[in-house]
Amino acid sequence: MPQLNVSLPEQLKRWAESRVADGRYSSASDYIRDLMRRDQETAEQQARLQEAIDLGRRSPPSDLTIEDIIARERG
């Protein structure tokens, strides 16, 4: 696996070490990988949300109420 060296201020280093000491992570690297995966997932979710917003803005106006739309979706 490729490596990436990261410099951290002492306070963040201690924080990462405390997360490992809590037992949820096997190492500081494991903790950092989890943070990065979560950040990636969040970015992907935000991109999908922005796509939906953009689609909605491009759609024509509607006379339907929100209740009509919900009822239609519930079928």
Image (spheres, rainbow, N blue to C red):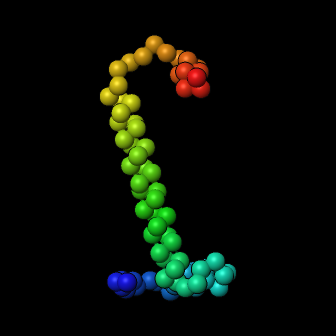
User: Which quarter shows the N terminus?
Assistant: bottom left
- Name the residue at 65% across, 85% down: 21
Up-down: is 60 above or below 22? above
Instruction: Farthest residue to the top: give it.
Output: 63
The answer to whether 59 appears left or right of 69 in the picture is left
Which corner quadrant of the image does residue 15 belong to?
A: bottom right
- Name the residue at 48% across, 76% down: 32
Instruction: Farthest residue to the front: give it.
Output: 75
- Name the residue at 40% across, 36% down: 53
Residue 38 x, y percent position in the rendering = 49, 64
The answer to whether 60 appears left or right of 12 in the picture is left
Asked if one can make out residue 18 in the rendered structure from this viewpoint, the answer is no
Up-down: is 12 above or below 42? below
- Name the residue at 55% across, 85% down: 27
Residue 7 x, y percent position in the rendering = 40, 85
Which corner quadrant of the image does residue 61 belong to?
A: top left
Asked if one can make out residue 8 in the rendered structure from this viewpoint, the answer is yes
Up-down: is 19 above or below 46? below
The answer to whether 23 appears left or right of 10 in the picture is right
Out of 48 and 72, give the one closest to the viewer.
72
Out of 74 and 52, give the one closest to the viewer.
74
